[in-house]
Amino acid sequence: MTKRIVIAGTDTGIGKTVFSAGLAGLLDGFYWKPVQSGLDEETDSEVVERLAGLPTGRVLPEVYRLKEPLSPHRSAELDGVAIDVAKLSLPDLPGPIVIEGAGGLMVPLNRQKKFIDIFAQWRMPVILCARTTLGTINHTLLSIEALRARSIPLIGIAFIGDEVADTQRTIVEFSGVRQLGRLPHLDPLTSGTLREAMVAGFDLTAIAGGE
């Protein structure tokens, strides 16, 4: 079983935190978001604590907690903090861990490094979360090219939203990357409805098996 899986997005606000919560719950693993930007509302770690159904202590603390809901590099500057990427080392844990990035792949951590640079150093397999709405073909194919250019292993694509069959098929055909499944928007969104949707929509064996 893959012990560490990085969850990346093609953009911000697409639902990858909800997907991360569902995946961490299915794997009965750990969750870690090393950098959180924006503290006024529920943080991503708090969302996962609420939705994943994991035992206490399985959601790891962030390395950096930044006040403003901006790109980490700018939020850190406003907080008077310098993000040291050397501190973002992978934790050694006794089970699977789901690691969530912030926003899209090219989001800057500081004035020198982007999140994708850290993913390239980690060399951990990535699941790319993509919306199904207009614009996703361009965003998703560009993200896949960026991952491949850095030789970052890609497990597959997790689509999020209503089914748009031709769009999903087009992305898969052009990229050659497998579709792992689709997570619909859930109303209500609870730990129970999320788990049901993940079980129905995704093949855990294919995900846990790696690239």
Image (cartoon, grey):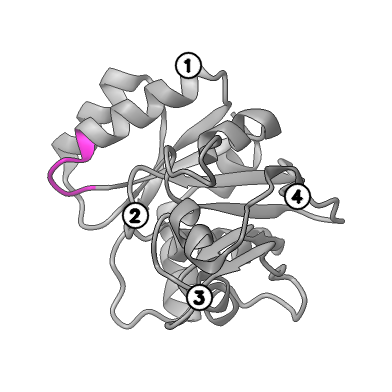
The disc label shown at residue 87, or none: 4
The span picked out in magenta is 132-137
Q: What residue is shown at x 52% (from left), y 77% (from top)?
A: 51
Of the residues shown, which amino acid type is indicated by label 4?
Lys
Where is mark 3, residue-wise?
Answer: 43
Secondary structure type for disc 1: helix
Query: Which residue occupies the foreground of this view, 3 or 144?
Result: 144
The disc label shown at residue 12, or none: 2
Of the residues shown, which amino acid type is indicated by label 1?
Ala
How far is mark 4 from mark 3, CA to CA? Answer: 21 Å
Q: Quadrant of the rendered structure where residue 52 is?
A: bottom right
Nearest to N terminus: mark 3 or mark 2: 2
How far is mark 2 from mark 4, CA to CA? Answer: 24 Å
Q: Quadrant of the N terminus?
A: top right
Nearest to N terminus: mark 4 or mark 3: 3
Q: What residue is shown at x 59% (from left), y 45% (from top)?
A: 6
Query: Which residue occupies the foreground of this view, 82 or 120?
Result: 82
Instruction: Assess whether residue 200 is covered by the magenta stretch.
Output: no
The disc label shown at residue 27, or none: none
Secondary structure type for disc 2: loop
